[in-house]
Amino acid sequence: MITKLNNKHSKIANLILKVQLPAYKVEAKLINFEGIPQLKDNALSIIDSNEIFIGYMDQNELMGFLAYSENEDEYQICRLVVHPNYFKQGIAKKLVGNFLNNIAKTKKVIVSTGSENYPAINLYKNFGFKYKNKIEVAPDFFITLFEI
């Protein structure tokens, strides 16, 4: 089940971290870049975040989540995270599909990911996201921007 998460509560913020940190450690290894900002998050930074979090829950266990921001022109997917124990079960696909079909119906959606993160790139392309730009955010490390 996909549900909105209240990241302002410390218990929820800690659940988010328990999914986020191991997932981003896998991504860091995949893209060969340890500087992913979300690896530095703690409960307070999650609580203080202005992003809106939706989570994929099964029997009260948070297995993955998507966090986004919104302004008057567009939505931005800020995080798409699945705990490594639940990789390859379609959770990220369900989260993105839910977001696009139920939340982001009327505005442009942008997302960025490490240029070497081929699983994420393929997921976004399968939803119709189009390549927009590639940006060097650290020496020899690039992120790719997509929009739909």
Image (cartoon, rainbow, N blue to C red):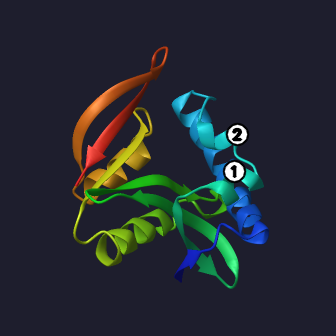
Position of residue 133 measured from the top left corner of the image (x, y, whole percent): 26, 32
Q: Secondary structure at mark 1?
A: helix
Q: Earlier in the sequence, mark 1 or mark 2?
A: 2
Mark 1 to mark 2 CA distance (whole Å): 9 Å
Question: Residue at position x 60%, y 55% from top?
Answer: 49
Q: Quadrant of residue 18?
A: bottom right
Residue picked out by circle 1: 45
> How would you rate the neighbour count of disc 1 (Cα within 10 Å): few for under 14, some for 14-19, many for 20 or more?
some
Residue 117 numbered mark, or none = none
Reply above or below: 112 against 13: above
Q: Residue 115 appears at what percent x and percent y? A: 39, 32
Please, is residue 34 above or below residue 14 in the view? above
Quadrant for residue 98, please give it: bottom left
Image quadrant assignment for residue 142 = top left
- As drawn, the residue found furthest toward the front would be 72
Label 1 with label 2: CB-CB less than 8 Å: yes
Graded by Cα atoms within 10 Å as few (under 14), some (14 to 19) or many (20 or more), the crowding at tag 2 reads few
Quadrant for the C terminus, please. bottom left
